[in-house]
Amino acid sequence: MGRPVYTPKAKINSSLFTSGKEWMTIDSNEEYIGYYHTYPNKAVFSDADFTEQSVELIPYTAAIEGKNNSIYFKLKGTRFNNYTEPEFYIPILTAKDYKKANFVRYFVQRKNDLSQIIEISKGAYNKINSRNVAGIDSAQYDKTAIPWTITGPKDIVRVTNQRVLSRSKMIGLSIYLTDLLEFYKY
């Protein structure tokens, strides 16, 4: 981003202080502790006001902590700080959903812990990615979407939802969804 060529002093937010885990230096990727200042273009520099010794700062990321992460970051310049953790979601159904007789449910499962399954919203499902942008990290989570029947004869709804679960590639989803008549309305 860089420091603007000219910025009126009144627009510079100076004499800010961080005690750590907030900023790191752009050149050495080391955690920065001390005074810093910001510019309207969101550029951040060390020291209370700009000096010849000021260095540009970037948001701190825990991805550089630890020997392996630090080495990978220094070699590749890649960080993993923009991902979000999955948030549990409870579907809120409308009369339109019940008129259609079904709706789509969205789930993620942690790849290294198959017992961790979380129902998420359609919006969160659509933002799952491997590009380190806002959303769930596809390298850590598998995803699936299933149609869930919610109206009709009870026995048929139960059998239909059981069939959907048995065809799902997500291991353990049938253990997670034990109520085959969840959201059912006759």
Image (cartoon, grey):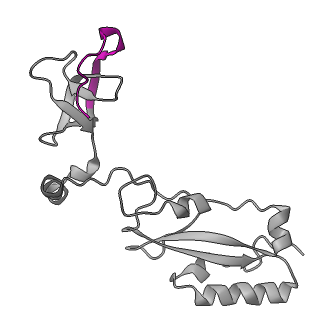
Location of residue 8 in the rendering, given as x and y in whole percent from the top left corner: 31, 11
Q: Is residue 61 left or right of residue 146?
A: left
Q: Residue furthest left?
A: 53
Q: Nearer the viewer, residue 40 or 23?
A: 40
Asked whether residue 9 appears in the rendered view, the answer is yes
Q: Is residue 3 magenta?
A: yes
- Give the position of the N terminus as an image quadrant: top left
Q: Is residue 6 left or right of residue 144?
A: left
User: Residue visible at 38% across and 67% down?
Assistant: 140
Asked whether residue 121 appears in the rendered view, the answer is no
Span highlighted in magenta in the image: 1-19
Q: Nearer the viewer, residue 175 or 91?
A: 91
Badge count: 0
- Give the position of the C terminus as an image quadrant: bottom right
Location of residue 2 in the rendering, given as x and y in whole percent from the top left corner: 23, 31
Query: Residue 132 is drawn in which quadrant?
Result: bottom left
Q: Residue furthest front?
A: 5
Q: Nearer the viewer, residue 163 or 76?
A: 76
User: Residue visible at 83% across and 65% down?
Assistant: 96
Q: Is residue 138 left or right of residue 26?
A: right
Location of residue 115 in the rendering, given as x and y in whole percent from the top left corner: 48, 75
Q: Is residue 82 magenta?
A: no
Q: Is residue 10 left or right of residue 5?
A: right
Location of residue 159 in the rendering, given as x and y in whole percent from the top left corner: 75, 90
Query: Residue 183 is drawn in which quadrant?
Result: bottom right
User: Residue visible at 26% across and 23% down?
Assistant: 4
